[in-house]
C-alpha cells in the first residue's frame, strides 16, 4: 500500500526516483526499496516525503483525508499505528526471506557433504582394489595363461567435484551462520 502510493505520488508530481532522492538527501536505491516494498521509511522520513510530494502523511500511508481534520495528537497516533503495522509486515517479510535463505544454505551444505562422502567412498574403493591387486600380484602379470587380463587404471586424485564441494560446504556454513536468528 505505502509503496504503491509513494510510486503513484512521485510519478504524479513528475519526479524521478533520483530527483526525489536528492530532495530527501538519500540515495536513489533507498527510494527504489521503498517503492518495491523492501523497506519502509521511518516517521521523520515520512514527514519529509509528504513535504517533497506536497501531500500529507495520511495520503502517503493510504488513508483518505476527511473534511474534519483531526487534531495533531490524533494524527500522530494514526501515523504511529500505521508505521507499526508497516514495520510488522516488513519484519514478517524479512523473517520469511531469512528462513528461505537458511533452508537453501542447508540444502547446499547437505549436497556438498554428500558429494564429499561419495568422493571418499570412491577413493576407499580404489585403494581397496589396488591393495587387492598388489596382494595377488596381478599388477605384475600382464596377459596370463587363463586368457586376456584386464588392465585396471586407478587414480588416487580427487574427483573434479571435490574442490567445488569443499567451497560449497564453506559457503553453506557461512550462510547458515549468517542467517541464524538473532
Image: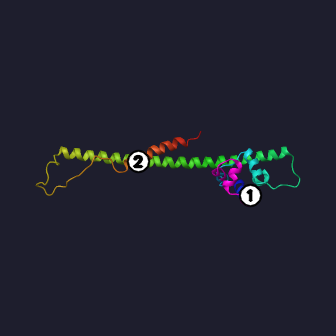
Marking on residue 9: 1
Q: What SS does tag 2 mark?
A: helix
Q: Position of residue 18 (x, y in %)?
A: 66, 54
Q: Position of residue 126 (x, y in %)?
A: 27, 47
* Residue 74 visible: yes
Q: Say what secondary structure mark 1 lies in.
A: helix
Residue 176 lies, with reference to residue 53, above or below; the image says above
Q: Could you tell which of marks 2 and 1 lies nearer the N-terminus? A: 1
Q: Which residue is mark 2?
A: 165
Image quadrant holding the N terminus, namely bottom right
Residue sitting farthest toward the left: 145
Q: Is residue 113 visible?
A: no
Q: At x 65% / y 48%, what residue is drawn?
A: 92
* Residue 129 image label: none
Q: Are marks 2 and 1 in contact (CB under 8 Å)?
A: no
Q: Residue 51, how many percent across, how many down? A: 77, 50
Indicate yes or no whether the magenta region holds residue 26.
yes
Q: CA distance from mark 2 to mark 1?
A: 50 Å
Q: Residue at x 67, y 55 (%)?
A: 17
Magenta highlight on residue 179: no
Amino acid at each position: 500500500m505505502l509503496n504503491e502510493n509513494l510510486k503513484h505520488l512521485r510519478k504524479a508530481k513528475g519526479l524521478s526516483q533520483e530527483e526525489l532522492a536528492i530532495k530527501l538527501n538519500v540515495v536513489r536505491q533507498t527510494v527504489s526499496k521503498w517503492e518495491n516494498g523492501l523497506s519502509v521509511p521511518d516517521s521523520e522520513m515520512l514527514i519529509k516525503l509528504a513535504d517533497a510530494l506536497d501531500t500529507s502523511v495520511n495520503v502517503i500511508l493510504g488513508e483518505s483525508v476527511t473534511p474534519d481534520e483531526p487534531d495533531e495528537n490524533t494524527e500522530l497516533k494514526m501515523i504511529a499505528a500505521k508505521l507499526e503495522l508497516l514495520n510488522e509486515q516488513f519484519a514478517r517479510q524479512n523473517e520469511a526471506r531469512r528462513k528461505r535463505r537458511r533452508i537453501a544454505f542447508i540444502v547446499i551444505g547437505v549436497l556438498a557433504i554428500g558429494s564429499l562422502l561419495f568422493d571418499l567412498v570412491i577413493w576407499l574403493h580404489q585403494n581397496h582394489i589396488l591393495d587387492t591387486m598388489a596382494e595377488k600380484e596381478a599388477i605384475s602379470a600382464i596377459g596370463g595363461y587363463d586368457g586376456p587380463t584386464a588392465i585396471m587404471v586407478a587414480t588416487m586424485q580427487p574427483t573434479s567435484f571435490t574442490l567445488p564441494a569443499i567451497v560449497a560446504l564453506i559457503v553453506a556454513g557461512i550462510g547458515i551462520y549468517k542467517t541464524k536468528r538473532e
